[in-house]
C-alpha cells in the first residue's frame, strides 16, 4: 500500500473521541479525588483532567472538541499521566494527531490488499516448526503456515479477519479465556488501525451490529498491542492446549504483525504440534493476492 497525505479532517477529532472515552473510564477515586454522592458526571470531569495534566480547562476542551489539533508530545505525555495511560497509549495518541492534522496515512486506491513481499514470506518461513501467521493493521490474515491452518482450520486462512473470527461462535467455543482474548483483540485493532480506514469501518460496523460484546469492548476505547500473551484453547482430538502467543511487529510501513504460537516442551500443546507436523507435506507459505 502506498502512503499519501490525507485530506484535512474537519468534522471529526479521533484524539477528542479517545480522550472523552478514557476520561469516562476513570473514577475520581482512581486518581485520588473524592467521589461525592450525587455526582452526575460519568468518570472524570474535564476540569479534573486538565488539573491533573497541568493545562487549562479551556485548552483541554479545545482538544476534546477538535478545535486544537496540534498538541505537543509534552502535552500528550501529560494527558497520558493524568488519565493513567501507558506509553503505548502515547504512541497511539501521536498517531491520531498525525492523522487528524493531515499527516501521512495508508491508502489502497484499488481497494486490494498488497501481496506479501518476499522478505515477509521468508520471515514466515523461518517458523515452519510452529504455528505462525501474519496480519495487516486491521488484523486480516495475509499469510499463514500450514501448522496454523491445521491447528485452527477455517480461522487462520489468508483473508480471514481475526476480530470477526474471535467474536464468532466457533472461536468462543474453543477459547477458554475468551473474554481476555476479545478485550485484547479489540484493543489491538484500535491501536494498529486508521480510524478513517474504510475497511476498519466495515469491520467495526459489522461487529457492532451483530455482537453486543464487541460493542461493549469497543466503546472502552482501549488501544494497545499485546506482544506476549496466552492462547488457552480446547481443540478436538487434543483437549486443552496452552500456547504462548508472541507477536512481532514487521519492520515496514504497513504495520504488519507476525504472530507465533509457542508450545512448551512436554505439554499437550507440544504433542499436538508434533502430531500435526507428522501429517504435513513439505512446508510452504500461503499468501492472499
Image: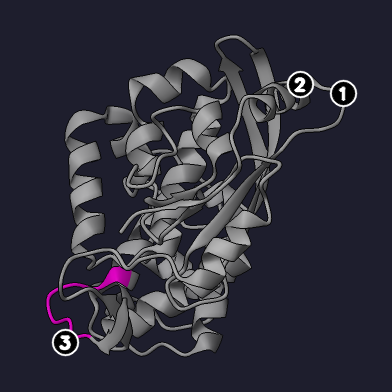
In the picture, measured across the screen, residue 55 lies left or right of residue 194, that is: right
Mark nearest the camera among 3 and 2 is: 2
- Whether residue 184 is visible to the viewer of this picture, yes or no, is yes
Query: How far separated are the C-alphas under marks 3 and 2?
Result: 53 Å
Identify the residue at horizontal 52%, vertical 29% (top origin): 150
Q: CA distance from mark 2 to mark 1?
A: 7 Å
Asked whether disc 3 touches disc 1, contact meaning CB atoms under 8 Å apart, the reply is no
Using the image, determine if residue 132 lies above or below residue 166.
below
Residue 58 appearing in the image: no
The part of the image, by quadrant, that contains residue 231 is top right
Q: Is residue 25 magenta?
A: no
Q: Residue at x 52, y 87 (%)?
A: 73
The relative height of residue 255 versus residue 213 in the rendered view (above or below) is: below
Q: Relative to 205, is 18 on the left or the right?
A: right
Please tell me whether residue 11 belongs to the stretch shown in magenta. Answer: yes
Question: What secondary structure prevails in the magenta region?
Answer: loop
Q: Residue 70 in the image: x percent, y percent?
A: 36, 90
Out of 242 and 57, give the one closest to the viewer.
242
**Image location (x, y in percent) of residue 30:** 59, 50
Image label count = 3
Q: Earlier in the sequence, mark 3 or mark 1?
A: 3
| Residue at far left of view | 11
Q: Quadrant of the C terminus?
A: bottom left
Q: Which residue is mark 3?
A: 7
- The region drawn magenta spans 6-14
Placement of the N terminus among the 4 image quadrants: bottom left
In the rendered image, residue 103, in percent from the top left (x then y), is placed at: 32, 88
| Disc 1: which residue | 266
Indicate the secondary structure of the residue bearing disc 1.
Answer: loop
Q: Which mark is residue 271?
A: 2
Amino acid at each position: 500500500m502506498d502512503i499519501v497525505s490525507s485530506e484535512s479532517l474537519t468534522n471529526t477529532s479521533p484524539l477528542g473521541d479517545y480522550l472523552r472515552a478514557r476520561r469516562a473510564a476513570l473514577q475520581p477515586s482512581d486518581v485520588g479525588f473524592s467521589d461525592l454522592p450525587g455526582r452526575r458526571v460519568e468518570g472524570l470531569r474535564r476540569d479534573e483532567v486538565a488539573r491533573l495534566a497541568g493545562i487549562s480547562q479551556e485548552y483541554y476542551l479545545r482538544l476534546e472538541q477538535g478545535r486544537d489539533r496540534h498538541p505537543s508530545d509534552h502535552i500528550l505525555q501529560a494527558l497520558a499521566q493524568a488519565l493513567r495511560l501507558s506509553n503505548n497509549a502515547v504512541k497511539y495518541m501521536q498517531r491520531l494527531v498525525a492523522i487528524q492534522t493531515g499527516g501521512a496515512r495508508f491508502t489502497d486506491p484499488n481497494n486490494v490488499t498488497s501481496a506479501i513481499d518476499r522478505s515477509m514470506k521468508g520471515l514466515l518461513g523461518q517458523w515452519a516448526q510452529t504455528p505462525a501467521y501474519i496480519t495487516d493493521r486491521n488484523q486480516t490474515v495475509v499469510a499463514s503456515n500450514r501448522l496454523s491452518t491445521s491447528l485452527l482450520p477455517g480461522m487462520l486462512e489468508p483473508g480471514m479477519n481475526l476480530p470477526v473470527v474471535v467474536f464468532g461462535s466457533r472461536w468462543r467455543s474453543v477459547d477458554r479465556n475468551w473474554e481476555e482474548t476479545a478485550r485484547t483483540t479489540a484493543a489491538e485493532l484500535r491501536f494498529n488501525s486508521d480510524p478513517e480506514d474504510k475497511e476498519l469501518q466495515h469491520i467495526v460496523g459489522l461487529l457492532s451490529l451483530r455482537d453486543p460484546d464487541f460493542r461493549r469492548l469497543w466503546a472502552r476505547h482501549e488501544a494497545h498491542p499485546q506482544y506476549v500473551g496466552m492462547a488457552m484453547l480446547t481443540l478436538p482430538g487434543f483437549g486443552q492446549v496452552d500456547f504462548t502467543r508472541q507477536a512481532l511487529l514487521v519492520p515496514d510501513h504497513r504495520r504488519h504483525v507476525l504472530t507465533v504460537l509457542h508450545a512448551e516442551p512436554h505439554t499437550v500443546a507440544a504433542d499436538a504440534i508434533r502430531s500435526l507436523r507428522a501429517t504435513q507435506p513439505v512446508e510452504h507459505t500461503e499468501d492472499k493476492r
